[in-house]
Image (cartoon, rainbow, N blue to C red):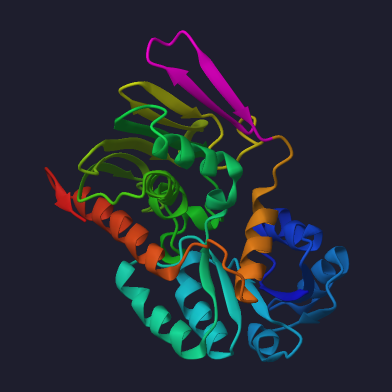
Amino acid sequence: MFRWGVLSTAKIGREQLLPAIVEAENGVLAAIASRDLSKAKALAERFGARRAFGSYEELLASKDVDGVYIPLPTSQHVEWTAKAIEAGKHVLVEKPLALDAKDIPPLIKLRDAKKVLVCEAFMVIYHPQWIKVRDLIASGAIGRLRHVQGAFSYYNVDPNNMRNQLDLGGGALPDIGVYPTVSTRFSTGKEPGRVQATIERDKKFGTDIYSSIRADFGDFELSFYLSTQMAARQVMVFHGEKGFIEVFSPFNAGLYDHHRVELHNQNHTEAQVFRFPGTQQYRLEVETFARAAQGGKERVFTLEESVLNQKVIDAIFRAGGKEGWEAV
């Protein structure tokens, strides 16, 4: 069994990853660390973790931990990923891994030196609905892909929330802009060459709260909008010459809508519906990661892919401050 350690008692861990680790068929929750030992002990008791630590360093030094999950604030991801690698631990780190693509290659060098697995936690690529989308496009089900359209929004104006704190890496693009780019790249196997963007920032928080983006993939275009201060919505549509594919709850399947993908024909007179009831994408993520860490030939989200995706986000930020196209 893969022995997991978790750095911090963050909400994403409490609500998604810790339950997934507990339910996983190939892993156990070995330890939880917090700078507040009482919080670590309370969460360890709640989820049945064997040990609780009052510092992250203590957990990383533990011989009872094979790998760690890091859901710390975004601005701390690179630092603690590096420390975990140095300690010889496998690392699953929450997205976004970095706030600049140039910060990732040093982690690749460390990973290779220590011979550990390090992955950014994009749970969507493990969900069968996205594997179905990728397979439908590859099989020619919608003919030539011409346009991908997406949206991801929610409403959050809590000043104490990390997503609204610029110094912690908050903002819409780091938090949710990564998903339309990752899912499009995963589904098509293509990379964008240039982007355009309009970005609006909150006058009080300083974070980006709305973006409208175009990305040129050569054979097709991706357009999407994001917001942290709009009514909640998620959708992704892949439009081809012979039909289109719509993903109704593309990123938080089961929350915004059912686990459902629809394939429509050219005349919009027929549709095939693919459903994936009961799928737990976070459990699939931690199980796949554990198998890969133990030598399995699993498809995971590599640091090399993280570099490519972060380059797109970096280019979008640059494009938001100018007219016209910005090279990725």
Give the percent coordinates (x, y) of residue 242: 35, 21
- Say which quadrant the N terminus sits in: bottom right
Give the percent coordinates (x, y) of residue 114: 51, 89
Magenta stretch, residue numbers: 259-276
Which SS does the magenta portion mostly show?
strand
Q: Is residue 203 above or below residue 283?
A: above
Give the percent coordinates (x, y) of residue 194: 19, 49
Q: Is residue 261 magenta?
A: yes
Q: Is residue 183 above or below residue 48?
A: above
Q: Is residue 160 magenta?
A: no
Label tally: 0
Do we see residue 289 in this rendering?
A: yes
Q: Nearer the viewer, residue 76 or 101?
A: 101
Query: Image quarter for residue 69?
Result: bottom right
- Say which quadrant the C terminus sits in: bottom left
At x 37%, y 44%, the residue is: 188
Q: Is residue 264 above or below residue 92?
A: above
Q: Nearer the viewer, residue 298 or 304?
A: 298
At x 46%, y 19%, the residue is: 264
Give the percent coordinates (x, y) of residue 22: 80, 62
Residue at the left extreme of this rendering: 324
Q: Is residue 117 left or right of residue 287?
A: left
Do we see residue 99 in this rendering?
A: no
Q: Is residue 298 left or right of residue 198?
A: right
At x 42%, y 49%, the residue is: 186
Q: Nearer the viewer, residue 103 or 132?
A: 132
Q: Is residue 98 above or below residue 58?
A: above
